[in-house]
Image: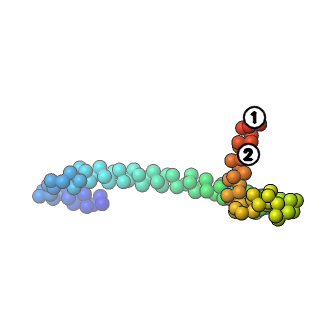
Amino acid sequence: MDKLIQLLASLTGYAPNETDLKVATLTTLLADMRNKNTGAINALTPLSNARIVRNTILYATGTGLVDTAGEVKKYLKSVFGATSPQYKQVSDCNEITWLFVLCINSRSIYATVK
């Protein structure tokens, strides 16, 4: 795009009436696009690192939250039985949904106790 703008600037007959097509506007647009592209590139590494940490917390074999939630569900089933209300509360949702609900409930319980 830079070369196209340079070409348009070098043409003496290029004088559009539309503001969007003027060389100054195109130059500003190009600078804005470059700044946004740099911002996106700079944000990519922290985003990738955050996803790695998230995936480790959720999916680490044996210690991740998904495995832990699965074990808790198995425990509830063994203690209370497959037809119990306690097990039914967690058996209908997957581990991620159940963990989300558990975290919200524990925060509200913590706030109540505190």
Left or right of 13? Residue 94 is right
Residue 95 coordinates in the image, percent (x, y) = 71, 60
Residue 80 coordinates in the image, percent (x, y) = 86, 59
The amino acid pointed to by label 2 is Ser
Left or right of 112? Residue 31 is left
Identify which residue, 81 or 35, lies in the foreground.
Answer: 81
Q: Quadrant of residue 94?
A: bottom right
Q: Residue at x 75, y 62 (%)?
A: 91
Q: Residue at x 15, y 55 (%)?
A: 16
The amino acid pointed to by label 1 is Lys
Q: Quadrant of residue 84?
A: bottom right
The count of marks equals 2
Q: Which residue is mark 1?
A: 114
Identify which residue, 4 or 98, lies in the foreground.
Answer: 98
Q: Which residue is mark 2?
A: 106
Q: Is residue 4 visible?
A: yes
